[in-house]
């Protein structure tokens, strides 16, 4: 009668199996991380686009109050600076002749924080939280500010047609971004070397003669 010898796995076979398992697991984890990062960035881009579209609509609505001069009052002085709430707040430079480029002399403007609900409803806010809700006070921006809106304006046809641009900044890391009223790019906080991304939208605003 012959005996059969049971044969186990050698150490080399076990090590090879563990190595293959580790490589496969690392690949799955890497793909999962990339999917999470991609989904998070897509969500921030989607919110930033919605916020920018909201501000474009706010500028369009503001331009409806710009009614002079008109056919019924052709000699009336322009009421751009007196009737509008946003468009007339800053001087609008004339762009280079024959181009649609805003030029370096046109600053990006960050509107001031509303400070209270009434002003928020009237003029909007430049700062939004991670889900796209407008913020009111500096404390809210410090704690929850994830998006910062800026706009700039340029005459295409002086006293008749304005080019309006809106951009919405957010940090690549998803952290808090400062959003204080003024002009120029917002500063990138220390510890965020990758800086910020932005969504850029543009439209034209016409006078609304009555």
Image (cartoon, rainbow, N blue to C red):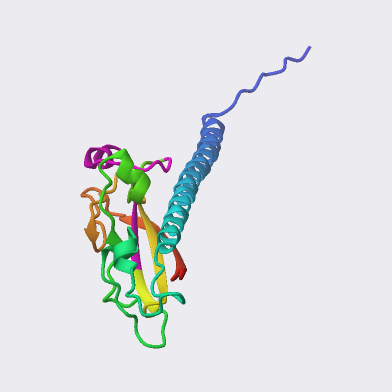
Front position in the image: 31 or 52: 52
Residue 175 seen in the current view: no
Q: Residue at x 41, y 75 (%)?
A: 73
Q: Position of residue 149 (x, y in %)?
A: 35, 55
* Above or below for 128 versus 77: above
Q: Position of residue 26 (x, y in %)?
A: 49, 40
Q: Is residue 164 magenta?
A: no
Q: Residue at x 26, y 66 (%)?
A: 90
Quarter of the image holding residue 163? bottom left
Q: In this image, 151 relative to 186: left or right?
A: right
Front position in the image: 57 or 30: 57
Location of the N terminus (image quadrant): top right
Q: Position of residue 87 (x, y in %)?
A: 34, 64
Q: Position of residue 153 (x, y in %)?
A: 35, 69
Q: Is residue 135 magenta?
A: yes
Q: Residue furthest right?
A: 1
Q: Residue furthest bottom?
A: 98
Count of numbered tags: 0
Q: Residue at x 32, y 80 (%)?
A: 94
Magenta residues span: 131-152
Q: In this image, 186 relative to 6: left or right?
A: left
Q: Residue furthest top?
A: 1
* Above or below for 87 versus 70: above
Q: Residue at x 46, y 44 (%)?
A: 40
Residue 65 seen in the current view: yes
* Above or below for 124 versus 83: above
Front position in the image: 207 or 30: 207
Quarter of the image holding residue 107? bottom left
């Amino acid at each position: 009668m012959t005996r059969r010898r049971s044969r186990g796995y050698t150490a080399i076979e076990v090590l090879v199996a563990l190595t293959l398992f580790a490589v496969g697991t690392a690949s799955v984890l890497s793909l999962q991380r990339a999917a999470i990062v991609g989904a998070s960035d897509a969500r921030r881009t989607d919110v930033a686009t919605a916020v920018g579209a909201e501000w474009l609509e706010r500028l369009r609505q503001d331009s409806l109050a710009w009614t002079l001069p008109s056919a019924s009052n052709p000699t009336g002085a322009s009421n751009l600076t007196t009737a509008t709430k946003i468009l007339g707040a800053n001087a609008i430079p004339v762009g280079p002749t024959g181009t649609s480029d805003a030029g370096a002399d046109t600053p990006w403007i960050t509107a001031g924080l509303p400070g209270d609900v009434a002003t928020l409803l009237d003029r909007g806010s430049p700062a939004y939280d991670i889900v796209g809700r407008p913020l009111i006070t500096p404390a809210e921006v410090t704690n929850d500010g994830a998006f910062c809106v800026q706009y700039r304006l340029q005459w295409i046809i002086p006293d008749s047609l304005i080019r309006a641009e809106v951009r919405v900044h957010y940090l690549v890391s998803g952290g808090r971004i400062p959003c204080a009223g003024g002009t120029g790019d917002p500063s990138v906080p220390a510890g965020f070397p990758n800086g910020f991304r932005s969504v850029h939208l543009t439209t034209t605003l016409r006078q609304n003669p009555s």
